[in-house]
Amino acid sequence: MAEKTYLQAISDGLRQEMRRDRRIFVIGEDVGVYGGAFKVTLGFQEEFGPWRVIDSPLSETAIVGGCTGAAIMGLRPVAEMQFADFISCAWDQLVTVAAKQRYRAGTPVPIVVRLPSGGGFSGGPFHSQNPESSFAHIPGLKVVCPATPEDAKGLLVTAIEDPNPVLYFEHKHLYRRIKADVPDDRYTTPFGQARLHREGDDVSVITWGAMVWTADEAAKQLEGDGISVEVLDLRTLVPWDRKGVLESVRKTSKVLVLHEDTHTGGFGGEIAATIAEEAFEDLDAPVKRITAPDTPVPFSPPLEKAFIPQVEDVATGLRELAEY
Amino acid sequence: MASSTSVTDVVMPQMGVSVSEGTITKWLKQEGEEIAADEPLLEISTDKVDTEVPSPGEGVVQQILVQEGETVDVGTRLAVIGPAGAEAPAPEAPAPEAAALEAAAPEAPAAEPAAAEPEPEQEPAAPPPPPEPPPAAAEPATDGAGEKTFVSPVVARIASEHGVDVAQVPGSGRGGRVTKKDIVAFVESGQAAAPAPAAPEAAPEAPPAEAAAPPAEAPAPPVTAPAQPAPPAPPPEAAPAVSAAAGEEIVPMNAMRRGIAEHMRRSLDTAAHVTTVFEIDLSKVVAIRKKLKPEYEESYGVNLTYLAFIARATIEAIKNWPWVNAEIRGEQIVTKRYVNLGIAVALEGGMGLIVPVIKNAEGLNLLGIARGIVDVADRARNKKLTPDDVQGGTFTITNPGGWGAIIGTPIISQPQVAILDVEALVKRPVVVQDTSGQDVIAIRPMMNLCLSYDHRLVDGAYAAQFMKELRENLESFDEGAY
């Protein structure tokens, strides 16, 4: 057990898996010589050689398409999109080929696509997005969004083991900001099991990724006012922990669904709809969503701050629910 | 009320004074089907009775507004009957549509439904966007007087589970809304517990009458009666968060089940239950029944059951032991010169229990009783009972013996003080004296009768003497006298 950043946990988890399984290789733009835009694979090429740590051309289509073929042939590729935003170039390979292959031909496609995502540092509209809901909508893909260093490692290991294409959203804003103890040994973190980040009685926040920490801060603020907030970290969106969410709803009867992705069609809508369907008689207030608005992510720092849900926004929303 | 050219609303009927809601169990007509006036349209279940609802007009079932399994308040619109030949309701068609939940108020809002009265069913007439900052205080303070505030789904559910009138609960939410916390605290404080939602405690008439559950609790030993009333009923569990584990299935309680659950619990919390068992030799009754049965069948079309004999003999015994046909009302003992005999009828498949009442059974002979039993049992099973049929019982008979039970400790139907449990008729070897006074073992048709009584009023000796007389009435059954 040692204290590690979120980024180190990803890096260590990946290295550990590559050491134990020779079928695993990484591919992406500048992941080799340069060690990746965020240095997740720094030193990998020295250790594993250029055949297992491949610098690809600037073509996400080629990266995901190549991974899909390699996976069908029995390898375990881990692709890196330099920024999650760029995955739109690989949409066809991912959605039309990788996601359907198992259904169509029976061959598993065990690929992991690492997606540095999220905003908070003026990256602007092409380097800050959270496109998880687009892929959560596609049957055949799994979607993972770790919030803690421990989960970052455990979910990555599970993603590599999984026989399906897994989109692994790693939040850039957490990379070096979040530190915690991470077990040294290999372990897996199951998909579809939410993590109770903070226990509370009055209002539940359902969230994932960086927003877990925003919710946590807001919950601390409200604690002083005697409002007890439960924070549930979904960890994975496909599959997502319906049971865990409904249990929390039945307990508090007031729910805030929080995400950094934009509003319309965001995964929060799916959660809110499920709560309405399954737990209507347990609700004591309308299900509330706090999300980014339906615009591109702005460059300007003050505008970006207005765009991404802030601690104060969440605290206000929670207060409204508590007082409802 | 409706002619074939107008549109008629079907509303949840008021089935008895204390009934505030009903559950749709079955639609007998579907949308688009034709229906005649007074033709059965649907079946409903309330905590008192299950019954059919006839169509208030003739025409076509245009729209069904409440689906099977849903529970709604009395007065809620359930369906719309339109003129025969009319099209299914065009979306923007007639007028009344919109206000699906507006209960009573039958004055049809002609053109503009909005204008009339404020009728704040939900939130105050606020702008659509999600409620913004203005916290508690700002709101127009909906104070008491009949003002309705929004009842959230979870509050509605807890209220119905515990029979709480939400209007009685102090609200701490926005605009005085009753929150889940408020109602849970209210329920836990016990304020919601004992007095049944409707009956104002002393009100003499119309006690709910579904009684006599199958044996469950062991009887208290017949020692001294506890003097003081039981402590307030234990706080019912707060909002049970039910979720199905592997291999389990969860079904919500219907109105009847909730009624039975509440009543049985309340009875055990109210009465000091004791059960006394007597063995009866029914040789004579068996012989008489054998003789009369074909005659009853032929002449009257009535099935003569053992239950009829027992009911008749019981009523006869009650005359001399009136305290088993009585009621405790406050500090007073109320005895009754009439016997309204409740007959517990189990519905098929264990789906519930209903206790229709044969009124003034003391005036009925064996034939009348036999007829009465057949009548109420049939109507109970066919859902033809009226609220009146299940009210006002003074003594109840339950009959699990039909399935072979030989002993039971039934629960009294409040506010009655006794219930007689009729067990299976079985042949047993018993010791009798032959004509020369010698003890011999004979085979006799024997039956156990178990009387549960409220020891607050009826003591053990009194109950035993009543049962002794009942036994004598049966063992020397005088067909001429009955």
Image (cartoon, rainbow, N blue to C red):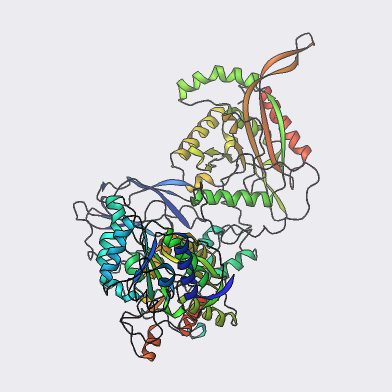
- Dominant SS type (magenta): loop
* Magenta highlight range: B218-243
Quadrant of the rendered structure where residue A35 is?
bottom left
Is residue B3 rendered to the left or right of residue B283?
Answer: left
| Residue B9 to residue A113: above or below | above
Q: Could you tell me which quadrant the N terminus of chain A lies in? A: bottom right
Q: Position of residue B162 (x, y in %)?
A: 57, 59
Quadrant of the rendered structure where residue B211 is?
top right
Is B349 part of what is drawn in magenta?
no
| Residue B414 to residue A112: above or below | above
Instruction: Tell me if residue B121 can be seen.
Output: no
Q: Position of residue A108 (x, y in %)?
A: 34, 54
Between B34 and B285, the one lying in front of the other is: B34
Q: Position of residue A85 (x, y in %)?
A: 32, 76
Between A124 and B77, the one lying in front of the other is: A124
Which residue shows up at 19% across the image and 55% down it?
Answer: B86
Is B241 part of what is drawn in magenta?
yes
Which residue shows up at 75% across the image and 34% down it?
Answer: B464
| Residue A319 to residue B310: above or below | below
Which residue shows up at 46% across the image and 46% down it?
Answer: B50
Q: Position of residue A260 (x, y in %)?
A: 40, 77
Is residue B99 rendered to the left or right of residue B176?
Answer: left
